[in-house]
Image (cartoon, helix red, strand yellow):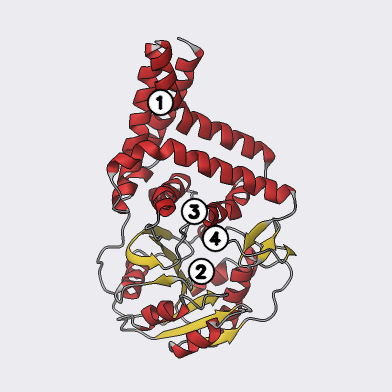
Amino acid sequence: MSGLAWLAAAGLLAWAYLLFFRRGFWRARERLRGTTLPARWPDVVALVPARNEAASIAEAVASIRAQDYPGRLRVVVIDDASEDETAERARQAGAEVLAAPPLAPGWTGKLWALAHGVERTAGERPDFYWLSDADIVHPPHLLARLVAKAEKGNCDLVSLMVRLRCESFWEKRLVPAFVFFFQMLYPFAAVNDPKSAVAGAAGGCVLLRRRALERAGGLRAIRGAVIDDCTLAARIKGTGGRLWLGLAEESRCLRGHTALAPLIAMVRRSAFAQLRYSAALLVVTLLAMGVVFLAPPVATFVGLALGDGAAATLGGLGWIAMAAAYRPTLVYYLRPAGEAILLPLIAILYAYATLVSAIDHWRRRGSRWKGRSYGPTGARLDHAPEDG
């Protein structure tokens, strides 16, 4: 076989592994269904960290306060030095609002705000904390289902990846792929398996058992984490806790992006942190993305052009396998299944975002979010401009 055919074969083998030996991540089946109701409804404190979220905070708070939850629920918004009307609108929506102290060295803003919320509500010793982002809205039945799942499954952390907005041209291209890649990195079935070391969570919606958080050392133990949700999940699982992670049916994100740049910024913020700031892992990742996502279509077209039947056939089979794996996530986002053939082009954008994330780190720009920039340990590097 030609070199191109061998490259195509490598891509096909990679997809065979992903389809059959990666815990079925691509099936997108993990959902929070109706479950057995607990005998006693635990006390819950909802903590909503917010920084410059005036556009969405009222709707987010309203959805939490509208929960049809039989137990005690306290709703607390922690204002992280917002420069807009976030705090005022949260109060108007009926939330208790706490002002986070000035950001301490070594902490990321979100974790600092959440830690303040935990500290200020510690006196009532709630059974669970419900961590919800300030741009997320939930259906009225959600908290009851989260708690029921945690109690029935003896879970210490139950998390949902909410539906990201998928309306603009670029959202339709990049958002389903973002969820697909997340599932590839953190197969939900493996996350939910106590025997597996894989740990993951989606920070927009996390129900966290208080005793498990205390056993894991509290939020201080992960204070500098840029990828705070998955770091928290790893900490909980590593200290004997049980996790459950699934896809949300109705909880959704209000934040939208009509342009490409803010979507790329969303990825580049944490991509190099995901690689543990390793140049070697960056090179391996980019090469692997080339083999897995680019080799199949390139081998298909070049093989056809050059009359290399083996390369074209192997490349075509790899491309078909790729599209088949991507299809369930597209269906979840109500997108046409035919868009699956575009995944190689979308992967190029994600590879670019990953490379730019590394360049940001090497230029000491750090991970930029909400007007702040953080280094590998959460240390603030500067007052970065907003990324959209």
Spot occupied by residue 317 in the image (x, y as percentages of width and height): 34, 25
Q: Which quadrant is the N terminus positioned in?
A: top left
First in sequence, mark 2 or 4: give its number: 2
Residue linked to disc 1: 12
Mark 1 residue crowding within 10 angstroms, few (<14) / some (14–19) / many (20+): many
Amino acid type at image mark 3: Ala
First in sequence, mark 3 or 2: give its number: 3
Q: Left or right of 337: which side holds 194?
A: right
Indicate the secondary structure of the residue bearing disc 4.
loop
Q: Are marks 3 and 4 in contact (CB under 8 Å)?
A: no
Query: At 38% across and 18% down in the image, what residue appears?
Result: 312
Q: Are marks 2 and 4 in contact (CB under 8 Å)?
A: yes
Spot occupied by residue 61 in the image (x, y as percentages of width and height): 43, 80
Q: Left or right of 313: which side holds 234?
A: right
Mark 3 residue crowding within 10 angstroms, few (<14) / some (14–19) / many (20+): many
* Closer to the camera in the image, 156 or 282: 282
* Closer to the camera in the image, 193 or 337: 337
The disc placed on residue 199 is 3
Q: Left or right of 284: which side holds 263?
A: left
Spot occupied by residue 179 in the image (x, y as percentages of width and height): 42, 51
Disc 3 from disc 2: Cα separation:
15 Å
Residue 121 visible within the image: no
Spot occupied by residue 267 in the image (x, y as percentages of width and height): 54, 52
Residue linked to disc 4: 239
Residue linked to disc 2: 212
First in sequence, mark 3 or 4: give its number: 3
Indicate the secondary structure of the residue bearing disc 3.
loop
Amino acid type at image mark 2: Ala
* Closer to the camera in the image, 306 or 233: 306
Amino acid type at image mark 4: Thr
